Image (cartoon, rainbow, N blue to C red):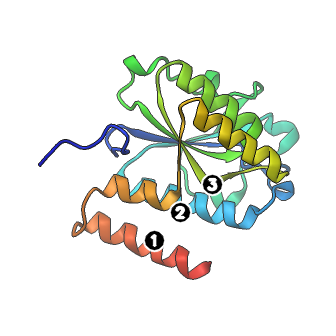
Amino acid sequence: MAGRSRELLDRRLSRVVVIDLQERLVPVIAGREELLADTRLLIEGARVWGVPVTLTEQYPQGLGGTVPEIRGLVDDTPREKLRMSAADCLAWGPSSQAERSQVVVAGIETHVCVQQTALDLLAIGYQVFIAVDAVGTRHPRDHDVALARLASSGATLTTVESILFEWAEQSGTPEFKQTSALVKARSAQR
């Protein structure tokens, strides 16, 4: 078998960061129900494959904590931040020193905290994947322009389902069957 493309996600090299899905921010986001459902699928799939998930919260004293339907899926305490970019509060250092150099980014807002985090992670060598169905903003134009900018800056735009099946690599395993069941359940909701 030939080696896998470096452009594909590898569950052994991946981590997920979910940015600022907070109680006072989520209600103003366009398509929030779909975004939350797709983020939930991403987190549940990451758990199946043993991919670590980190939550961030922008000034939680003023904006509230992570919404319960997402917070309840992650054991670790969310990382608090005041800067728009989460790179500092993640404190992962350069990718050359990291065991996991692929970062899947989800959350809000696409043109603010998601974009700044992704650009900062790219600057320190991480391979960044934007889960386009698990990021959002208040205004579609801001979302679209941010995704275009991120793609032109080197981030890979993809979907939650693509991410999960790249982590799977092959069918027939118990984890694949769990992943497939999660995807089917999400598809039934659409």
Of the image marks 1 and 3, the number of the one nearer the N terminus: 3
Of the image marks 3 and 2, the number of the one nearer the N terminus: 2
Q: Which mark is residue 41?
A: 2
Q: Image quarter for residue 174?
A: bottom left
Look at the picture and state if 137 lies above or below 171: above
SS of the residue under disc 1: helix
SS of the residue under disc 3: strand
Of the image marks 1 and 2, the number of the one nearer the N terminus: 2
167 left or right, relative to 19: left
**Marks 1 and 3, Cα distance to the nearest angstrom?**
15 Å
Q: Which mark is residue 182?
A: 1
Q: Which residue is mark 3?
A: 134
Residue 134 at least partly seen: yes
Mark 2: amino acid: Leu
At 36% from the left edge and 45% from the top edge, which residue is drawn?
Answer: 8
At 46% from the left edge and 77% from the top edge, which residue is drawn?
Answer: 184
